[in-house]
């Protein structure tokens, strides 16, 4: 069994002390940096853009997992590769030609991820699952941090895991939204490989300890 990974979501970090929080993640037991790029069109919020990602990448010493919540993500694939993204995740709902988009991401040397909104059935990935490196299941509606976890996510993890095994695919399952110490083990047991945690980590009084505990629970 591969170790379950923890990816703190920088959207929940203190933007006034961003370098400090990036260094904290570097020195913690976290595995990845999860970075949400929102355009105010695909989702009702605007997060940070290229200059902030560039600044984070200059200090980040771990995998940079970039989650694009934007329309027409194909326009920016090359740019995000140049900014240091290791994994680039696009939303199924934002891609007209998903297979082409996945090929373009891989052509730039990144791993290709696909995110699904809570209302989107995992079956839509049946024909592309073998071209995907990471599936990000949204366990809240995308656009804002601090939302409550959607319980149906457990069913989706089971369904997705069954498809991956049946298709002989090599895909990591990532959960994004409302992840805490209360649901981490159940998600890991269902088949999740990567847990994204934002508010739960950055609003805690001892962030490195919270990351350590979350990782221990997920791998228990």
Image: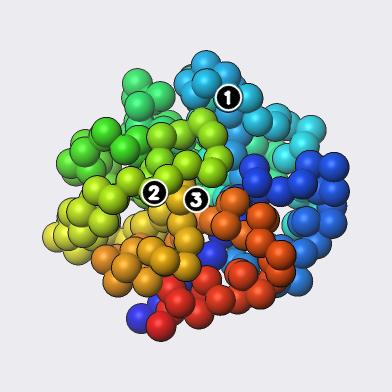
Residue at 35 percent of width and 21 percent of height: 96
Other-residue count near label 3 (Cα within 10 Å), few / some / many at <14 / 14–19 / ≥20: many
Question: Of residues 65 and 158, which is closer to you in this image?
Answer: 158
Residue for point 65% across, 30% down: 47
Task: Give the percent coordinates (x, y) of residue 138.
Answer: 39, 43
Please identify, in this view, whether the residue under mark 1 or under mark 2 is nearer the observer: 2
The spot of residue 68 in percent (x, y) is 53, 34
Residues at marks 3 and 1 touching, judged by CB atoms closer than 8 Å: no
Quarter holding residue 93: top left
Asked if the residue under mark 2 is in contact with the one under mark 1, i.e. CB atoms within 8 Å, the reply is no
Q: Secondary structure at mark 3?
A: strand
Q: Residue at x 55, y 40 (%)?
A: 145
Instruction: Give the residue pinned by disc 3.
Output: 111
Residue under pointer 1: 45
Q: Quadrant of residue 146?
A: top right
Direction from residue 166 to residue 19 in the image, left or right: right
Question: Label 3 to label 2, Cα distance in Å?
Answer: 27 Å
Label 2 belongs to which residue? 149
Residue 2 picture location, percent across and down = 41, 77
Above or below residue 68? Residue 63 is: below
């Amino acid at each position: 069994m591969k170790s379950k990974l923890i990816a703190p979501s920088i959207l929940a970090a203190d933007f006034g002390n961003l370098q400090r929080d990036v260094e904290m993640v570097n020195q913690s037991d976290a595995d990845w940096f999860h970075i949400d790029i929102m355009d105010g069109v695909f989702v009702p919020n605007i997060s940070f853009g290229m200059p902030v990602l560039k600044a984070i990448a200059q200090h980040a010493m771990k995998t940079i997992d970039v989650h694009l919540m934007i329309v027409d993500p194909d326009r920016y694939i090359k740019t995000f590769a140049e900014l240091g993204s290791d994994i680039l995740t696009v939303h199924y709902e934002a891609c007209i030609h998903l297979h082409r988009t996945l090929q373009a991401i891989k052509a730039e040397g990144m791993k290709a991820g696909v995110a699904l909104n809570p209302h989107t059935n995992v079956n839509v990935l049946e024909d592309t699952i073998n071209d995907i490196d990471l599936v990000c299941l949204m366990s809240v509606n995308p656009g804002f941090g601090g939302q409550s976890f959607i319980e149906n996510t457990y069913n989706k993890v089971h369904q997705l895991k069954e498809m991956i095994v049946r298709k002989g695919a090599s895909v990591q399952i990532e959960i994004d939204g409302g992840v805490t110490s209360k649901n981490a083990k159940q998600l890991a047991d269902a088949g999740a490989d990567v847990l994204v945690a934002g508010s739960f980590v950055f609003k805690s009084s001892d962030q490195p300890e919270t990351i350590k505990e979350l990782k221990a629970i997920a791998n228990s």
